[in-house]
Amino acid sequence: MPDDLAWETLDTETAYTCPGFDIVHEDVRLPDGTESDFDFLREGDSVVILPFTADGDVVVIEEWRQAVKRLNRALPAGSMEADDDAPRAAVDRELREETGYEADDVRHLYTAEPANGYADSVFHYFLAEGCTPTAEQDLDFNESIRVETTTFEALLEAVQAGDLQDGRSAVGIMYYALFER
């Protein structure tokens, strides 16, 4: 049953494409019958992983982020790929590729649409426990990532102090602190 607030999509085209995302242009009809247009970023689904070692430390990454021109401290994360049948499959791949770690146990924490006013991004948050280094990193050509471990308390303090500014990581850390500890 359609919602009386729903917009009708009349036409869709990809206005711009690049590795990682597309910009989509749509012609739409608003609920009052007005025709307009709407542009949004198509990024799709990603996973964000809160990985704990057997000793209780958290595996984090430091990665250069060109858009903000600084080093970014964050949780491992990445986009789902075409051959990922579910977000859970992307967790194992992304954790291994970005950090060289693998987890004994993984479970879903939370799913969020971080910017649904202008993007179709969906972040699936997962808790990974019993993480151990098992391999070398296998980074994409455009990734510059350093791996380290820290305590969960230090991460939480960094969020509170505004030192950890990566939004998707901050949400995962705060969710865990509020609902899982």
Image (cartoon, helix red, strand yellow):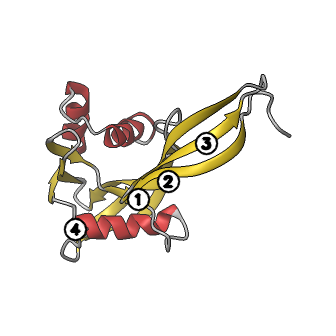
Relative placement, left or right, of 61 versus 21 is left
Q: CA distance from mark 1 to mark 4?
A: 15 Å
Check contact, mark 1 vs mark 2: CB within 8 A. yes
- Report helix, strand or loop for mark 3: strand
Viewer-proximal residue among 1 and 168: 1
Q: CA distance from mark 4 to mark 3?
A: 32 Å
Decide which of tag 4 and tag 2 comes sooner along the chain.
Answer: 2
Decide which of tag 1 and tag 4 comes sooner along the chain.
Answer: 1
Q: What residue does disc 3 label?
A: 26
Decide which of tag 1 and tag 2 comes sooner along the chain.
Answer: 2
Q: CA distance from mark 4 to mark 2?
A: 21 Å
Residue 44 is labelled as: 2
Decide which of tag 2 and tag 3 comes sooner along the chain.
Answer: 3
Residue 110: percent from left, percent from top: 50, 46
From the viewer's perspective, is residue 161 above or below residue 146?
A: above
Among the 4 quarters of the image, the one containing residue 170: top left
Residue 126: percent from left, percent from top: 43, 54
